[in-house]
Amino acid sequence: MFMRDPIRRFKTAAGRVLAAALAGTLAWGPVPVHAETGEALPLQSVNAEEIGKTKQSLYADIFDQVFYEEGVQFLRLRDLARKITFTKPEAWNVNIYEEVPDSLFFTNRHGRKSLSAAELKEGPKGPAPARGKWTVIRGKGEGVNTGFFVRDSAGNDFLLKFDPIDYPEMSTAAEAVSSRIFHAAGYNVPAYHLVKFNLEDLEVAPDARYYDDTGFEKPLTKDKVEELLLFVARNTDDSFRASASSLLKGKIKGPFHIDGHRKNDPNDSVPHRFLREIRAIRVFCSWVDYYDMRTGNTLDVVETVGGKEVLKHYVIDYSSTLGSAGYDPKPPQFGHEYLFDFGEFFKSVFALGFWKKPWQKRWDENDRTVTDPSLGYFDNRYFHPGKWKNQIPYHAFKDLTASDGYWAAKIVMSFTDEDIAALVQTAEFSDGEAGRLLTKLLTERRDLIGKYWFGKSTPADRFVIKREAGGVRVEGTDLVSHYRLDPAPRAYRYAVHGSSLKGESSGPSVLLQDSALAGLPETFVLCLQSRNAEGKWAKPVELTLQKDAAEGLKLTRIRRKP
Amino acid sequence: MMKRLNGERTAVAGILAAFLFTMTPPFVFAQGEYDAYTRVLPRQKQRETLTEKSLGFLAFPFDVIRMGMDQTLYTIEHYHIDDKIKWIYDRLTDYGIYPKLQNMANFGDFGAGVDIDLVKLVHQKGNLPYLKMKTGVAWTSNELFRVYTEVGMDKLNEIGPYGSFYFNFEERPEEDFFGIGPNTSRGDSQTFKSEITTLETRAGYSLTLDLDLKFRAAYKVANIKDGGDEGKGKLDKNIAGARGGDFLVIGSELAHDTRDFPDDPHKGGFERVQISYTEGVDGYDFGYFKYRGEAARYKEVFSERQVIGIRFVGEHNDELNDQEIPFFDLARLGGYGVYPSLGDTHRGFQKNRFFGESLLLMNLEYRYLVWQYRDFSLDAVAFWDEGQVFNEISEFQWKDFRESVGGGFRLKVLRKAILSLEIARSDEGINVYARSNTPF
């Protein structure tokens, strides 16, 4: 009866609208944490049927990110304000100690506990193609290099990808090494195995089809397979070498968006541009020159984790890494410029052609040739970890802060020389010199990354609190010294917020005298800052310390300035 | 009792915890005394609010456009439409059919055309590799309708003779004419329509890879009528050639071309000398010689990404005795200067802005690479066109030179320009060009 009351009816309707708006707000992106403990909530099951498959289009991705977003970003007032003020938003999923907890995107692996050489070489778990006949079931629909899907004698499906005829081992080696690096770093990666086979090992399913260069789907016959294989590199014994990617089990739901998020996945509520592990992909990509990192090279798969069906997010396709661009060596500007880089473009225009870009210098110095066909074009001269770019400019990668970069660099630096050598062994180069050179290049590049990102933020880490006579010592490890990136000692200074307590030290070690502690509140913030190689004070690290009867002090939070 | 049980449980839990703590591998608390990988998050930022989201409201209308564009691009990619179009084009060219989009002379103009190699069309290229049988049709809105056919013999090798018979019909519905000489006014614009039919015999000999000699003899019928643009004045019928005419033309051309890559030269150049005589027939009192010389040079400067190109053009039309030169065959200057335009390049002025018996022109361009991605590249170009028309040689004056300056960008695929966007300025205003070729 009361619904006839117009005022009440209006209020009810307004309430519904408000509730819907609120729900919309919440659905947009609360970090799923417990309201009181602040602990990330356990995973929620998803209904695989309700989650649609996202569309993947390289053309749309290029249009959106390279042209549309580069212009329209200035109409988004918040982004515009950030640009004007030279600020970047902090990542939302960083824990109280500046680390990224395990998630459906990322699992802390080598950075948390060193994997053995065997574990590194094994890489992601997944079956290798079983011996016996392999049946070609369809052609590869996307990408630029030759490939097709096969089913092995055990019934497992694989995608076979090959090396271009003039660059044997180049892209298959790149895929073997880089996929394992990404996996060890923490990303979800399908298993890639190097395989060797002969034409006789292949048979073709009667219903196999493929898209040829006419754009029409055609039957894939044995003759056609042989014809396609005419344009791929062969081993010296005339056999074929391929990278076999184990197809992921589970329902495929298309790629995940690098910037946005999937609205109907309760475990994916944070826009990805605010996830540290997504932003920091750029750092790992810079290490292995994964210029082709884009939405199309990601994949969401419904899998069972901890008894729940969840959507797991993978980073796939590593054939365009290191010196390879898939079907040819990496063009020299890759890694230095976006596909169309407005900044570089305008610099070139206004320089009237008199400015030689670093990659142009390098290309000229190299006589515009690729010296080792199995490595493609990969070197470290003019490599700048902070300026490295993939071909598509996502907001997530541009939002990478000093603290995000520091986090990623810690993981990169956790790979020892021996680890890298072990990883490079998986490339199975026929020429040992290529392997040695790649190891050297990756090692050098690792150090360049560490040096750069550790220079942007105060490189004090792994804090230990020790009671000493007369006080409590808060001591960290200087990662630059630890990894011997710079032999010169680093000057440090410290200060306690809201107090006059401050001083200088030769390393990240501060002795807080009992007498000084007595004058501090129960919880206080100790700020540590180091000088970087340029002599500037790096962005500080803030330690929140709580007085503790047993240990004197307890570290409750680490925060790095973004 | 409960208290004691609780106490025992606490003790057991404590022992268990202590045991677990000592047995736990150090990596669990890899960074000393705290679990660095705890799932506890600081509550610094937990949601993107509606207010924050709404700060992007200015972009919302564009987002709708983007969605449409994305869907289109997705459809193209998903259904391999681009590959299909390319395949269809390749198949057509296999059959000797070359569809083409006509050059845009101005924004808004559009057109299409097709060239057909009839020998290829009937699959006789293998049997008759030297037979040349071509026909084509082209149309550009407000500018041109053209059909042509050419039958003859191609060169046996790179060096050697060749020849053909050629038929061409061109209708130009709206050609501008501003008067003759250097001091005409833009305000005196007249418009005319021309229909020119040409029957021609061509013969030539390539003396070397770079050097080519050509002869031609043509019969030409020109119908000149009032132009289609009602907003402009009608053509003054007292001007020589305003009523058209029938003509016999004989001429020759010597060309020397050393460009390294004709579509995008970085080195070398070309020189071309043409001489022809035209005689009015069927009672038309025309008779004149046409002399034309053209030379261009290209040079990389500082690096191979920077090229300077310079071109000189000179033309003189010399009437015989008291005979006349039809206005439409005078030297023309103005506009972008590439077919279907008949005038030479002076980009700051509109097409056919100047008519005269003689012409002197210099085009200077500085081209430099500003972007490249695989087979695509983009050059920036800065140019300076300096030229004038005049009638008799004795009337030449330095002060009559007019200049255009400007710049633009040229998008190339495999070093062939597919889009040139240029803006030029002169004392008569600004012109903007979107073309699929380059002036020289």
Image (cartoon, coloured by chain):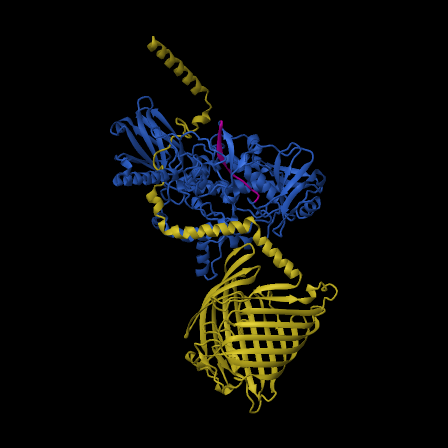
Chain colours: A blue, B yellow
Nearest the camera: B197 or B213?
B197
Question: Where does residue A70 sit, x and y in percent of width and height?
Answer: 43, 52
Residues in magenta?
A: A307-319
Quadrant including the N terminus of chain A: top left
Question: Where does residue A237 sit, x and y in percent of width and height?
Answer: 71, 41
Where, by quadrant of the figure, is residue B122 drawn? bottom right
Query: Which secondary structure type mostly characterizes the magenta part of the structure?
Result: strand
Residue at x 57% of width, y 51% of height: B80
- Give the residue furthest to the top: B1
* Left or right side of A73 for A253: right
B355 w.r.t. A264: above or below: below
Where, by quadrant of the figure, is residue A537 drawn? top left
Nearest the camera: A73 or A99?
A73
Residue at x 60% of width, y 81% of height: B221
Question: Where does residue A196 sit, x and y in percent of width and height?
Answer: 67, 38
B83 w.r.t. A102: above or below: below
How many numbered discs, if any?
Answer: 0
* Left or right side of A407 for B326: right
A380 w.r.t. A417: above or below: below
Quadrant including the C terminus of chain A: top left
- Give the residue furthest to the right: B127
- Give the residue furthest to the front: A1
Nearest the camera: A16 or B274?
A16
Q: Is residue B19 visible?
A: yes
B89 w.r.t. A454: above or below: below
Question: Where does residue B439 sit, x and y in percent of width and height?
Answer: 53, 69
- Give the residue furthest to the bottom: B322
Question: Is residue B368 in the magenta section?
Answer: no
Q: Is residue A163 visible?
A: no
